[in-house]
Image (cartoon, rainbow, N blue to C red):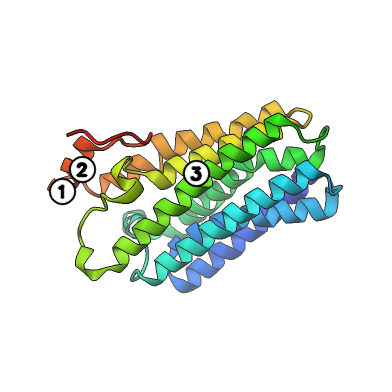
Amino acid sequence: MNLFLLTALLLFCFMCLVFLLALRLEDNSIVDIAYGLGFVLIGWSGSLVYGTGDARQLLLLALVSIWGLRLAGHIAARKRNEEGEDPRYQQWRESWGKTFVWRSFLQIYLLQGTVIYLVALPMLLVIRDPGGPLGWLDLFGVLIWLFGFAFEAIGDWQLLQFKGDTKNRGRIMRYGLWRFTRHPNYFGEATLWWGIFLIALGAPFGWLAIISPLLIDFLLLKVSGIPMLEERYVGNPEFERYQQRTSAFFPWFPKS
């Protein structure tokens, strides 16, 4: 069994277990916690079986693990402050009716697992063959990753603090990094995966890893990121004013 097949099977089994747990809890939003953990699972599993301890392998494994564990921890902490299932999943639960169980497995868990696998491609390529020694491109990639990671983590922390204050219930976050972009966490995540791609370029066939940041950008900008989240605020006057003044994705000074 090769690296790509092993990690695919492990990820499939992991998503099946999360699906069964969600059925028991009647809460599909736990898949958001599992998202970051899926990367950590296949990264460490693949490295333990096929890794050589090369510097580039260890570097990417560390960066992806730090990102995945922080994201899972943040979502778990956020979920403790919320009641019940995330509204997105509640809507699907109601609209899918009797087909809810199998559609959940296919359209949430199997699809999420596929996304994880494709986005993790830079890490898997480096585990397969790390290439030569680390160089300037790797350093540049780490710096971009650090910038993106900090942007995402700070944005998430600021939003968590804002929502934790009962005085802000029903209000729109417009402070800190959220003053310059409506989605600093999305911008940070997209950025850090470009850094990981640059590091993966040092491996043979590393150029294939471009699938990862391009997929993340597409999902955040066109599918499950900004469009789905902002749809919930349609008709909200405060959000519409915020929308008119603040960049959707790339940080920029707010319009006067």
Q: Residue at x 58, y 59 (%)?
A: 69
Q: Which residue is mark 3?
A: 189
169 vs 45, left or right, is left
Q: Residue at x 47, y 55 (%)?
A: 104
Q: Is residue 107 something that shows in the picture?
A: no
- Distance between mark 1 and mark 3 Cα atoms: 26 Å
In percent of width and height, residue 68 lies at: 58, 55
Q: Which residue is mark 2?
A: 242
Q: Which residue is mark 1?
A: 238
Taking the view exactly as shown, the residue that stands out farthest to the right is: 52
Label 3: how many Cα within 10 Å (few below 14, some 14–19, many 20+): many
Q: In what quadrant of the picture does the C terminus appear?
A: top left
1 or 3: tag closer to the N-terminus: 3
Label 2: how many Cα within 10 Å (few below 14, some 14–19, many 20+): many
Q: Residue at x 20, y 60 (%)?
A: 170
User: Circles 1 and 2: CB distance less than 8 Å?
Assistant: yes
> Which of 167 and 221 lies nearest the eye of the viewer?
167
- Tell me the kind of residue under disc 2: Tyr
Q: Which mark is residue 202?
A: none
Q: Quadrant of residue 194?
A: top right
Judging from the image, what secondary structure is the residue with disc 1 in? Answer: helix
3 or 2: tag closer to the N-terminus: 3
- Tell me the kind of residue under disc 3: Glu
Label 1: how many Cα within 10 Å (few below 14, some 14–19, many 20+): few
